[in-house]
Structures are given as structure tokens and as C-alpha cells.
Amino acid sequence: MSTQVHATLSEDAVEQISEDLGEPEWLLETRKDALAALDDLEMPDVIQTPGRKWTNLDALDYETLVDPLDYAQDKDRIDAEGVDVLSWSDALDEHGELIEDHFGSVVDTERDYLTALSTALFSAGTVVYVPEGVDAEDVKIRTTMNSRSLFNYTLVIAEESASVTILERQTTGEDTEGDQYYSGVVEAVAGENAYVQYGTLQNLSEESYNYQVKRGHADTYASIDWIEGNIGSRLTKSSVETRLLGDSSESQIVGAFFGHDDQHVDIAARVWHEAEHTVADLVTRGVLDDEARSVYEGVQDVGTEAWDTSSYQRENTLMLSDDSEADASPKLIINNHDTEASHSATVGQVDAEDMFYMTSRGVHPEKAKNMLVEGFFVPVLEEVAVDELREDLDQLIYERLRE
């Protein structure tokens, strides 16, 4: 692995982060193992065609982007009755054994170079613990990055018959200048008959590079739903994944993005059906303007034991400029004949007939285009059950159209 990060990346730096957070020895050793693995790990998988990588992560200048001991941030957490929403240090004090059981059990700490880097360096952490039978809404986490780089880690544990809805916002502080690097890892564990809904609204500075992986394990009758809105950053590489491990488990992955200028958005949605009667629904819509570019990969993997499976995927991209570019790669991997599965992906311009209809009735062309774009996002916004997230995303889309 030829990629190098900041010269201060060392065991001493990792030990300093761990000491600052008051971590136990087992976690420090996990960090060190991830650090040692960097030399042998590759970048996260990206779609490739002969002679071309659709996203070039190797081109990032990590040496200037990452400074391990500079992790200034503001973190706001709003909990709900019966739920612990804790900083990393407080969570280790109160739920140390629980964290040890689950940390790295969903997202492999050494799955690729950037995930291992996050494991070694994460400093902004939150643990959401929902005890058995608790029903909670309106858990909120707001992360504001005030440094050149920030590594964020979130662990969600919902015990049997528990339910939680979480809304996370990611922004950049007003005084932050120059290129930045943000990394976020989310692990979600849904016990039997539990429900986890995790919504993220990413509106980082357009001078930032953004890497995120969100992954959940759903037990019997459990559901994990992901909602992801990507508006900010110069480059985003995001993977949202669910393993349906228990019979009758379900997952929905809803995504929306709006790229302009020279933004690059690379998003992946993946579901593994590994048990009977499992259900998945993947829906993503995005808009591109100017010279923006999007890459989408959706994977539905139906295992040999996944009898009576339903799995659906659809991705639609609307291009407002001749200079924008969109690529999509939906995939079905079917290893069980007792399956209902489908996928679709479309890329296109604003419909000329719709524009003609509206302008011929006196609507200004710019207003007509904006109305059509807002309408294009409606099928995704309707899938967002969290009112606040839906309204905030709708507002950001409105503002982007009128810049």
C-alpha cells in the first residue's frame, strides 16, 4: 500500500488518543492492530471498467488532510426517555463490557485502508444503547467538524423488542478553512424484534473529503432502516449495508443526493439476505448540475438459505447539465430460486415535454425546472418517516436550486 498519511501517524499518536478518551487496554490494542494493518490494506472497493476507476481514492492527499491529534469538534447529543446516548468516554465507563462485545462485530475494523485508519484514529464517538422493550424516538446527534480531519464512530445497540429513531447531522464549523477529511463509521445491532432507523444528513464544507460506512445486523423479526442525504463535501464515498441474519428481518435503504459544481458522489447500498422470509427495499434518487458526477452501486445478495425473499432496488439520477456525469451499477446475486427480486437504474435529463407544458402556460423556465426537480425528489422524501429529516433535506434541496 503506497498511500501515506501525516507523518505524525504513529503508535504514540494512537496511544495519546486512547488515553484522552480513557479507553481500556483491549481497545488500544485494537487500534494498534488497525494501525499496523495499514501497510497491507487496499482502498475501499470502487467500480472499475477496463482502464478506468469510477472513483479514484488513491489520488487524495492524505499527508496534508490527516493530522491524528488535531480533532477539534462540537458534539450535541439529545437522548430520549429510557435510552442512553453517551459520549465514548462515558459509554466505556457505564457499558464497557457491552461495547467490548459489539465493537467491530458489524464493521470489520480492517476491511480496507480507510476503515482501518478510522479504527486507529477515531476521536469523536457516540454510543446509543436501547434496553429491552424501550420505544424511543427523536434521538439526535449533531457533529460539527472544527479541524482539518475528524474520525467519528457511532455504535447503536437495540436489545430485544426495542425501538429507536436516530437523526444525525454532519456539518463543518464556520472558522474551518482549506481542505478537510471526515470519516464516519456506524455499527448498528438490532436484536430480536427490534427496530432501528438511522437517518443522516451530510452537509459538510465543499472543501471536504468524506468517507463513511454504515452497516447493520438484523436479528429475527428485526428491522434496520437507513436514510442518507448527501448535499455537501467535494468528494463522498459512502457505503450503507445491512445483513439480514434472522428469519423475517427487514431493511430499507433510502438515499438522496444533489451534486453541483465539481462535486463527486460515490454511494453504495448493499443488502445480504441470509435467512428466510427477509425483505429489503433500496431506493435512491439524485440530481446533478454543472460538472458534478455520481457513481452508484446497489447489491442485493440472496443466500442459499434465504427462502421466500423479497428484494427490490431502484436508482434514478436526473442531470441538469450536459457536463454532469452519472454511472450506475445495480446488481442481483441470487442463490435461491424462491425469491422475488428486481432492480432498475435510470439516468436522464429533465423531461422536455414537461418543460414545454409548464412554460407554455406561463411558468418561467427556471422556475419550471426547479419545480420538476423538487417533484423528482418526492418519491424519496415520502419514504423518510422522520419529519425533521425530511423537512431539512427538502429545505437544502430548495436552497441548492436557488443558489
Image: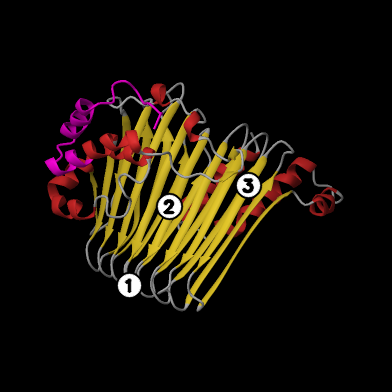
Residue at position x 80%, y 49% from top?
355
Could you say which disc has been placed on residue 327 in the image? 3
Residue 8 belongs to magenta span: yes
Looking at the rendered structure, the kind of residue marked 2 is Gly
Give the residue pinned by disc 2: 199
Could you tell me if residue 394 is visible in this image? no
Q: Position of residue 106 (x, y in %)?
A: 31, 55
First in sequence: mark 1 or mark 3? 1
Give the residue pinned by disc 1: 220
Q: Would you identify the image quadrant in which residue 386 lies? A: bottom left
Q: Specify how the rendered protein is coloured.
A: secondary structure
Looking at the rendered structure, the kind of residue marked 1 is Thr
Residue situated in front as seen by the camera: 284 or 237: 237
Could you tell me if residue 321 is visible in this image? yes
Residue at position x 29%, y 54% from top?
156
Rate crowding at label 2 as few (under 14), some (14 to 19) or many (20 or more) other CA atoms within 10 Å.
many
> Does 384 appear above or below 154?
below
> Taking 237 as reference, is 94 left or right?
left
Residue at position x 28%, y 34% from top?
121
